[in-house]
Amino acid sequence: MKPWGKKAKAAAAVLPGGPPPGDAPRDRSLVTPEGVDLRLRLGDGGERATALMIDLAIMLGVLIAFTLLTLLAFVGSRGKGGEVIATVWMLVFFVLRNLYFILFELTPGAATPGKRAMGLRVAARNGGRLTADAIFARNAMREIELYLPMGFLIVNGGQVGAWISLAGLAWCGVFLLFPLFNRDRLRVGDLVAGTWVVKAPTRKLVPDLVQSSRPSHGRFVFTQAHLDAYGVKELHVLEDVLRRYETKTVALVAARIRLKIGWKASPDESDGDFLAAYYAGLRGRLESRLLLGKRRKDKHDKS
Amino acid sequence: MAELHLKSYRFRAEREDDWRRLETLLAKVGKGSAKALSDEELLAMPVLYRQALSSLSVARATSLDQNLVDYLESLSTRAYFFVYGTRSSLVERLGGFFANEWPSAAKALWRETLFSFLLTQAGVAAAYFLTLHDPDWFSAFVPGDLANGRGPSASAEAMRATLYHKGGDNSGLSVFAAFLFTHNSGVAIFAFALGFAFCLPTAMLMAYNGCMLGAFLAAFGMKGLGFEAGGWLAIHGVTEIGAVILAGAAGLRIGWTLAFPGDLSRPAAMAQAGRQSATLMAGVVVMLFCAGILEGVGRQVIQNDFARYGIALVTLVLWPTYLYLPRRAKAVP
């Protein structure tokens, strides 16, 4: 049932090293076996930290709830079922601490609830399959990255000197902050497992602006000169403005464009209609030039 | 009506249904597993995926609708991870792990295992002779809460009592076993993770582990209880110490690769070593589970020295046979 999976490992490849392809420093190219670059975006430090906080909160919540439950059960059984209850509690604690991340990352989504909430997922760095051993490796390393520093914070300094505690904490900090000091935002666990954490957001396909603005169109006729005022960058800004549709911004942008192209507004013309029509016109013009191989980057691009 | 002539608009209108279909299928997978899809849908998936990819290429080249390009990128990425992701079932994976991956990982790390074993041995020998020579060393090697009243200063009778389980009351054994398992697994995973700091902490842990063992044996040996203590220790110790040695080996492999990556680039070498030693670590957890049961239940129920030694001997034969005996290579498809 997997005729298409055979050659994946060999064919899919992330170009090693090299500068990132896009403008953003967090973009990485992932060329599928079909030869299309998917342009993955790495999860940044903030998102990863937030995801971890969410996961820790969930773990803590579950642990507290479960502990209360076992206490209730213990009281309910009048202390008779103590042995079974204690065993179960210990095993559940073990599963939570060591297997929470592993089990969630083994699912098809390859993400814990926290990562899912932040639109992140784990992926193999070489573009191949994400194997179970890699997931185990990246999460076993949490022992020194996460639990050890936490242990240092919790332990009371009475037993060892404050300086030793501090030195230990600093040493742990190296692992904890490791992701901030490399280009690919790799944890120690990611390094060991050959994985990384990428954004895999679910985006909605919203109606095309050209379609939704159709009725009001015929009234606006733009000349070639009008449409040559802007490039792709401005088009995308305009798209953004129209999609958000904040009245103030729309009015400002419309005034700005009218001024730039020297458009004389008729008294009953609405800013929104004007912008929508101009967007359609500009996109048509730029796309037809694109078909001829000319991509006009922005308004300063004179090609 | 210029907008109707926009090629990018027509392009989208023609293909949108297929994209939506792929999106629905992916949402279905996201909720359940791959089993949520019918055979027909499963077969349609790669076709829809390739359509989405080709749409993405075209859209990047011809469309200036930013939302459309973003949407297609996200859709293709999600579909890519599904189509080229893992889809073997849990049972298949587990079977492969026990039949193949674990033993072959153990074999691949034989050098580290040997080293880790020798370190432990050195620790045992050093602590044994030091404690025999001067009993004060015992407290240096064994922390007070672990010694639990045992030690050179305790009487032989008290020491003997710690070796055998009194009375027929077997309650609390499963708790004890669970505690031992979770505690030991934590320690083992810790030893593995510490290997990342260039082997040193792991090596120290291995040696120290050996030291505790040696000091214990010496303390009992001095009272003439060496044979009995051996049985008490060996029934679970063969499995448990074996597991800890393997965990140390996995940690050493990681630290060693970090320092000396060999022919591969450092990240690639690390990834390879990490996956291999992680497989071994999963096996270590399984071994510790067995050790926890042997220690928590077996040792308390079985009070006869010879029976204890017998079980120890069986484990001593079974584990190496399972892990290191050559087996037929997996048929390459």
Image: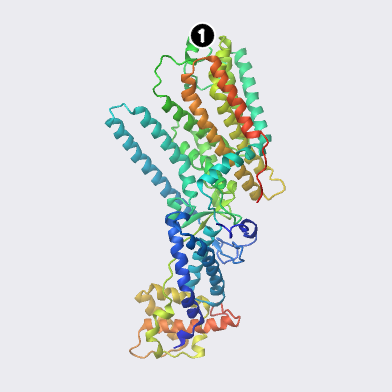
* Residue A162 shows in the view: yes
Position of B127 compared to A202: left or right?
A: right
Q: Quadrant of residue A87?
A: top left
* Residue B205 shows in the view: no
Q: Position of residue A24 (x, y in %)?
A: 55, 64
User: Is B67 placed above or below A251 here?
Assistant: above
Question: Which element type, helix, strand or loop, lies under badge 1?
Answer: helix
User: Is A272 placed above or below A5 here?
Assistant: below
Q: Position of residue B158 (x, y in %)?
A: 47, 11
Is B293 or A268 nearer to us in this picture?
B293
Q: How is the image coloured?
A: rainbow
Q: Quadrant of residue A154?
A: top left
The image shows a total of numbered marks equal to: 1
Is B78 or B200 nearer to us in this picture?
B78
Q: Quadrant of the N terminus of chain B?
A: bottom left
Q: Position of residue B147 (x, y in %)?
A: 50, 19
Q: Is disc 1 surrounded by few (<14), some (14 to 19) or many (20+) residues within 10 Å?
A: some
Q: Position of residue B77 (x, y in %)?
A: 52, 62
Q: Residue furthest front?
A: B39
Tell me which residue sits at (44%, 55%) in the image. Answer: A116
Tell me which residue sits at (45%, 65%) in the image. Answer: B23
Tell me which residue sits at (52%, 37%) in the image. Answer: A168
User: Is A88 placed above or below A30 here?
Assistant: above
Residue at the disc numbered 1:
B156
Q: Quadrant of residue B312?
A: top right
* Chain at tag 1: B
Residue type indicated by callout 1: Ala
Position of A235 compared to B114: left or right?
A: left
